[in-house]
Image (tube, rainbow, N blue to C red):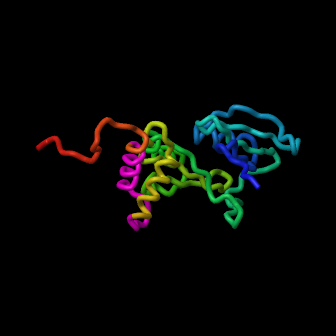
Amino acid sequence: MRKLQTQGVHHITIVGADRQTSIDFWEGVLGMPFVFEQPNLDNEAESHLYFDPGDGRLITVFTSEEREPDSTRTATDIGCVQHLAFSLSQATFQQAVVRLDERGIEHSGVKDRGFMDSIYFEDPLGLLIELASYRFEPPFGYTHSDVLLEAHGIRVGRGDHHIAQDHLTDAIEALVERSRPSLSDDRSPKNPYR
């Protein structure tokens, strides 16, 4: 028996209401270009809208003019989607509260997640959306996941409750030290300001 190895998220499809509500939210609020549309090939009564979330992958929405937005409908029972999270640069994240407030969109305010900051709000259909921004950049050749895996090991080894800035800093240093050779025999911290 062998695994089916994934290589990233291909797309996420959401059951939407009418076409314009989807365009107004995904492009008009979150800035995702509306890049493609065709009929839902499994249900000709629906349209299939495609949006680019910024990494070239896709968020797609099945729409029908027969459905109206209902913000009380989205279930979070076992097996249901709890929320979708989208990455923002720190520059954009710093403006997110103001820009949501300008539209009158209720939100959680900024939540400290240790390794990232988050803001939560609901789309017009009641789906919880997270805007997330990492507090660190991975070293060249590594991903955010690589840093988090390394930081997790450091955190667990120290018996700490959750990942914090010192775990991230130490993880980045460890990844760089393992992956970047040096002519120095001793790479330990030094104080040249004696």
- Residue 82, picture quadrant: bottom right
Q: Position of residue 39 (x, y in %)?
A: 83, 37
Residue lying furthest front:
185
Magenta segment: does it hold 169? yes
Residue lying furthest left:
194
Q: Main secondary structure of the magenta part?
A: helix
Tell me which segment is drawn in magenta.
158-176
Magenta segment: does it hold 183? no
Q: Nearer the viewer, residue 99 or 139?
A: 139
Quadrant of the snapshot with the N terminus: bottom right
Give left or right: position of 38 versus 106.
right
Q: Residue at x 40, y 47 (%)?
A: 172
Q: Position of residue 37 (x, y in %)?
A: 76, 34
Q: Residue at x 40, y 38 (%)?
A: 180
Quadrant of the snapshot with the C terminus: top left
Give left or right: position of 164 versus 184.
right
Q: Position of residue 3 (x, y in %)?
A: 72, 52
- Residue 122, picture quadrant: bottom right
Q: Position of residue 16 (x, y in %)?
A: 74, 48
Give left or right: position of 113 versus 33.
left
Give left or right: position of 65 versus 86.
right
